[in-house]
Image (cartoon, coloured by chain):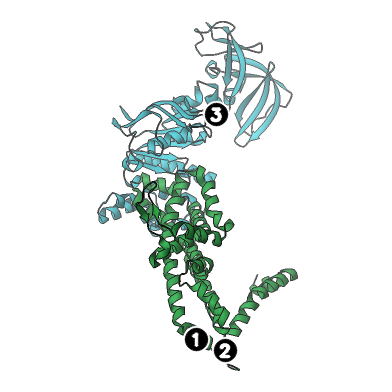
Chain colours: A cyan, B green
């Protein structure tokens, strides 16, 4: 059963003398209670606009937003029980940490004892029990964002919205804080929407990911589905690194594809396609392996073009036929890497060969 | 590195320009102070100050200017804050126009402003095509003239007040703070009174003190509207007396310094408000 429903949401900006810009087009999805859904996409894809419509800061041009079946589309932001965490923390500089966390509770006219108790609970939750009397400027960025999270959670909101909450933090804190956010979200069982342009962040934190592009949903799926089975070229390219090449269907019945004369076997169902039909063939770099004793489906001759060390992995550029592909292997100092210019054989499973829509 | 070695490291030319600049500002002040203390021959004393403060016109004009300044500041705040807030929040495209309007007092001299006010408000303003008087001629009674004075001073102080408030709003990112407060259930009154205003305290104080300084020393508007203000009093005093104007000028300067000190005290801790990262 859907807890939060975004039904056919569109948002147009401008108008009047200028052509209206459609920031979000026909956004349609249902989110279950306790689920954490990430909106992932590049800048300007409409992810933040969609989030702001749920918060009530933007009014949809068309469509409705429901929480537990109740239409909240026309409600003002202060009438929706929706908590929000901002990229810039947005803590009130004139208030202490405790006052920031208790702000919403005081607005809701909760008894002062209850406010105190809840503030204490929240401070314990974010492991900042001794910071209640400090001011925001006395805290680090990570601490400020934890306070902002506690402030948003203090009111026990129906939905928690996080608008790129880690973007302003350095890499190490981002990693630790995102797992803390996920732990707290699971612990409280709160429904959350997380906006990010960082695919790794979305992968690590989400139950499901909505990949957006130019205001539209490209694909909705679990991190596993989004990464391993992207349905469009955009998703495949945006999430992780991907080899893509123009190819054509060689044999629809057996899933045989031809890329520049080299044949690839794919597990993708091609029965609906015609022989000779142009398609986009995609293979993740880590799905390639050098051929060992065990022979696999696609055994392909290649020439080693270049080798790049990227820390834990080594990215090797190979030439298969006349098409360049990348393959990733773990950086194992005990294993010898091929030499540049050497001719080798690589392989990948049939499942690794994807056929994408443009 | 201790202070003396730090001072030694400052280049000669920096010292030279610093000393020349300091002399440029300090010498005239010292001369004014020295002159104001020599009202009695061969005696250094405060007679000029006592004489100036004992003059009933001083108290009357200073009191009038202070009360007009306070009203001007209040009206300016009431008008400026919602305008700047709304422009930042909902009408960012109107920002340039509003900024242009607020800079007009730098371009249009006070003399033009005062003649405009006198010309329009010295006759009754009626509802168009009728004889029904909407506003009586404001220049014909004291309270009406004071309204014109406040309106004029508000215009003169607008560049300072608006810029202070607008800069303050930019510093604290009012848009996000407003949205954060809204998401926590706050209504407009709560947002303005508990979130926005407390964070604009130093900006408001800066704007208010600058407006105060303008009102206290202003001559043109007050003279042409014929109100008993401090600016024209000081001007007239300077034409008839020698030592008292110097004493009052120095006193005004001390008041300005005190005002600057208050700004420093109040805004001292706010520079850190952006947070440690």
Residue B3 horizontal/vertical position (percent): 64, 73
Q: Is residue B30 visible?
A: yes
What chain letter is assigned to the residue under label 2?
B
Query: Helix, strand or loop at disc 2?
Result: loop
Q: Is residue B73 above or below residue A178?
A: below
Classed neighbour count for the residue bearing mark 3: other residues with Cα under 10 Å, few (<14), some (14–19), many (≥20): many
Asked if badge 2 and badge 1 are on a common chain, one would say: yes
Asked if badge 3 and badge 1 are on a common chain, one would say: no
Residues under numbered marks 3 and 2 in contact, where contact means CB atoms less than 8 Å apart: no
Q: Residue at x 46, y 51 (%)?
A: B84
Q: Is residue B264 visible?
A: no
Q: Nearer the viewer, residue B46 or A326?
A: B46
Q: Cα distance, mark 3 to mark 1?
A: 81 Å
Disc marking residue B51: 1
Residue B143 horizontal/vertical position (percent): 38, 66
Q: Which quadrant: the C terminus of chain A?
A: top right
The residue that label 2 is drawn on is B39
Mark 3 or 1: in front is 1
Q: Residue at x 45, y 45 (%)?
A: B89
The residue that label 3 is drawn on is A238
Q: Nearer the viewer, residue B113 or A266?
A: B113
Q: Which quadrant: the N terminus of chain A?
A: top left
Mark 3 or 2: in front is 2
Q: Cα distance, mark 2 to mark 1?
A: 10 Å
Q: Cα distance, mark 3 to mark 2?
A: 83 Å
Residues under numbered marks 3 and 1 in contact, where contact means CB atoms less than 8 Å apart: no
Residues under numbered marks 2 and 1 in contact, where contact means CB atoms less than 8 Å apart: yes
Mark sitting earlier along the chain (2/1): 2
Classed neighbour count for the residue bearing mark 1: other residues with Cα under 10 Å, few (<14), some (14–19), many (≥20): some
What chain letter is assigned to the residue under label 3?
A
């Amino acid at each position: 059963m859907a807890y939060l429903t975004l039904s056919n949401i569109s948002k147009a900006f401008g108008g009047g003398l200028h052509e209206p810009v459609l920031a979000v087009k026909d956004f349609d999805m249902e989110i279950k209670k306790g689920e954490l859904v990430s909106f992932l996409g590049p800048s300007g894809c409409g992810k933040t606009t969609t989030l702001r419509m749920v918060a009530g800061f933007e009014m949809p041009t068309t469509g409705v937003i429901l929480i537990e079946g109740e239409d909240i589309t026309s409600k003002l932001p202060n009438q929706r029980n929706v908590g929000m965490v901002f990229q810039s923390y947005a803590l009130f500089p004139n208030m202490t940490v405790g006052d920031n966390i208790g702000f919403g509770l005081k607005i809701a006219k909760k008894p002062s004892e209850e406010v105190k108790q809840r503030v204490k609970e929240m401070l314990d939750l974010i492991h900042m029990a001794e910071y209640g009397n400090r001011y925001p400027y006395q805290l680090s960025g990570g601490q400020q964002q934890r306070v902002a999270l506690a402030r948003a959670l203090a009111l026990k909101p129906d939905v928690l919205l996080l608008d790129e909450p880690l973007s302003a933090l350095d890499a190490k804190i981002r990693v630790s804080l995102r797992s803390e956010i996920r732990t707290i979200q699971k612990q409280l069982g709160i429904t959350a929407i997380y906006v990010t342009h960082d695919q790794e962040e979305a992968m690590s934190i989400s139950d499901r990911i909505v990949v957006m592009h130019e205001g539209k949903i490209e694909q909705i799926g679990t991190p596993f589905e989004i990464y391993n089975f992207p349905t469009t070229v955009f998703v495949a390219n945006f999430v992780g690194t991907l080899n893509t090449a123009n190819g054509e269907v060689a044999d629809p019945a057996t899933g045989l594809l031809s890329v520049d004369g080299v044949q690839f076997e794919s597990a993708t169902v091609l029965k609906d396609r015609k022989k000779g039909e142009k398609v986009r063939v995609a293979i993740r770099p880590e799905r390639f392996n050098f051929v060992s004793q065990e022979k696999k489906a696609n055994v392909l001759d290649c020439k080693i073009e270049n080798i790049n060390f990227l820390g834990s992995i080594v990215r090797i550029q190979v030439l298969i036929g006349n098409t360049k592909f990348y393959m990733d292997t773990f950086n194992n100092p005990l294993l010898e890497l091929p030499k540049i210019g050497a001719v080798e054989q690589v392989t990948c499973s049939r499942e690794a060969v994807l056929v994408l829509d443009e | 590195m201790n202070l003396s070695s730090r001072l030694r490291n400052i280049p000669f030319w920096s010292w030279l320009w610093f000393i020349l600049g300091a002399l440029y500002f300090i010498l005239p002040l010292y001369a004014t102070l020295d002159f104001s203390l020599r009202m009695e021959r061969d005696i250094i004393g405060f007679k000029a100050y006592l004489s100036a403060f004992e003059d009933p016109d001083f108290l009357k004009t200073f009191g009038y200017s202070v009360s007009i300044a306070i009203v001007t500041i209040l009206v300016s705040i009431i008008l400026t804050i919602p305008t700047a807030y709304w422009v930042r929040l909902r009408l960012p495209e109107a920002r340039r126009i509003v900024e242009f309007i607020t800079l007009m007092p730098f371009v249009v001299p006070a003399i033009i402003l005062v003649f405009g006010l006198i010309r329009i408000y010295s006759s009754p303003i009626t509802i168009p095509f009728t004889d029904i008087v909407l506003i009586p001629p404001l220049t014909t009674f004291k309270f009406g003239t004071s309204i014109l004075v406040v309106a004029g001073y508000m215009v003169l102080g607008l560049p300072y007040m608006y810029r202070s408030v607008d800069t303050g709003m930019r510093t604290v990112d009012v848009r996000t703070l407003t949205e954060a407060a809204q998401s926590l259930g706050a209504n407009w009154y709560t947002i303005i009174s508990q979130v926005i205003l407390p964070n604009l305290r130093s900006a408001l104080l800066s704007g208010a003190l600058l407006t105060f300084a303008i009102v206290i020393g202003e001559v043109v508007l007050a003279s042409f509207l014929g109100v008993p203000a401090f600016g024209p009093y000081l001007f007239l005093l300077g034409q008839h007396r020698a030592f008292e104007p110097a004493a009052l000028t120095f006193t005004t300067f001390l008041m300005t310094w005190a005002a600057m000190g208050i700004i420093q005290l109040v805004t001292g801790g706010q520079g850190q408000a952006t947070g440690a990262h």
